[in-house]
Amino acid sequence: MAETGRRRGPAGYLLMVPAVVWLGLFFVIPFYSLVAASLYDPGGSDEKGWDMSWAFGNYPDAWDRYWEPLLRSIVYGGIATLICLVLGYLLAYVIAFKVGRWKTLLLVLVIAPFFTSFLVRTLSWQLILADDGWLVDALQWMGIVRGEGLLYTDFSVIMGLAYNFLPFMVLPLFASIDKIDPRLIEASSDLYSNPVVGFFKVTWPLSLPGVVSGTLLTFIPAAGDYINAQLLGNTGTTVIGSVIELQATDANQPQVAAALAMTLMVLIVGMVLVYVRRAGTEELF
C-alpha cells in the first residue's frame, strides 16, 4: 500500500525529458516525414516541388511493382535468423556450461568481428566464396558443388547475413542460458531417459527469453539489410533495401521509396507482434 500510495515528485518527470526529446527528434519527426513522403503526389518533381496530396495509391502501386524484392528480404532475413539461432544456441550453450574460465575470452571472440567495419566483414566473404578460393575448391573436390560457384548467389547473400548478425543472436542467448541452474539440467537427465526430451522440457523453456530477444535482434536488421545483397548477390537477389535506395536517389521517386519503407516496417511490426504473442513472452515488452 505504501508503494502504491507514494506520490511521484517532479524529479521523475524531469528524468524523462531527455528520452522524450530524443524520441521526438529522432523518431516522431522522421516518422512523420516518412509518412508524408509516402503520400506525395506521384506527378511531383524537384522542379515543381513535392506536395502531400494524400495519394494512398502509392502503396498498392509500390507493392505491385516491387513485391518480389520485398518478400525476398523477408525470406532472406528469416533463413539467416534460423541459421543464427541454431549456430548461436550451440555456441552460447557451450560458452555458458562447457568452457569454464575461458568463458570471457570466447565472449570477446564472439564480438571481435565488430572491431572492424560492416563493409569489410561483408567483402571478406567475396574472398571466402570466390570461384578460385579454397572453400569452393574443397567442395568441388568432394562433389558437393558442381558447375557454378557459390559467390553472387542466394547462398552467399544468406551466409553474409548470418555471419554479420550472429553476435546479435549469441549474446542474448548466452545471457539467458547462463542464468539456468546446472542442477536443473542434471535433474532433467534423471527425470527423462532421452536427453533430447530433457532439453526441450527444461533447458529450452528457460532460455526462451533469450531466443525471442535474439531472433528479433537478428531478424529485424537482416530483413532491412541490403549491403550483403549488393556485394554478394546478383540482379536476381535484389532486396527491398536496394530498391528503396535506388528510388530515393537515382530514380528520384521519394513517394515510392517512402511507401516501400512504410510497407516493410508494417510487415515487420506485424510479424513481431504475432511472434511475441505466439511465444508467450509479452512481458519482454
Image: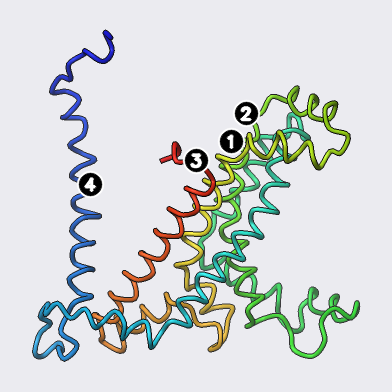
Name which quarter of the figure residue 154 lies in: bottom right
Identify the image quadrant of the N terminus: top left
Say whether disc 4 or disc 2 marks the residue closer to the N-terminus.
Answer: 4
Name which quarter of the figure residue 70 lies in: bottom left
The numbered dot on residue 22 is 4
* Residue pointed to by mark 1: 175
Q: How is the image coloured?
A: rainbow
Type of amino acid under label 1: Ala
Mark pair 4, 2: CA separation = 33 Å
Mark pair 2, 1: CA separation = 7 Å
Type of amino acid under label 3: Thr
**Is there a contact, CB below 8 Å, between mark 3 and mark 4?**
no
Say whether disc 3 or disc 4 marks the residue closer to the N-terminus.
Answer: 4
User: Seen from this angle, which residue lies furthest right?
Assistant: 142
> Looking at the image, is 115 positioned above or below residue 119?
above
**Image check: 144 left or right of 259?**
right
* Residue pointed to by mark 3: 281
Q: Secondary structure at mark 1?
A: helix
Q: Which is closer to the viewer, label 4 or label 2?
A: 2
Q: Secondary structure at mark 2?
A: loop
Q: Secondary structure at mark 4?
A: helix
Identify the image quadrant of the C terminus: top left
* Residue pointed to by mark 2: 179
**Is there a contact, CB below 8 Å, between mark 2 and mark 1?**
yes
Residue 248 image position (x, y, % from top left): 29, 80
Q: Residue at x 51, y 79 (%)?
A: 230
Type of amino acid under label 2: Lys
Say whether disc 1 or disc 4 marks the residue closer to the N-terminus.
Answer: 4
The numbered dot on residue 213 is none
> Looking at the image, is 239 positioned above or below residue 32?
below
Residue 214 image position (x, y, % from top left): 55, 48
Q: Which is closer to the viewer, label 1 or label 3?
A: 3
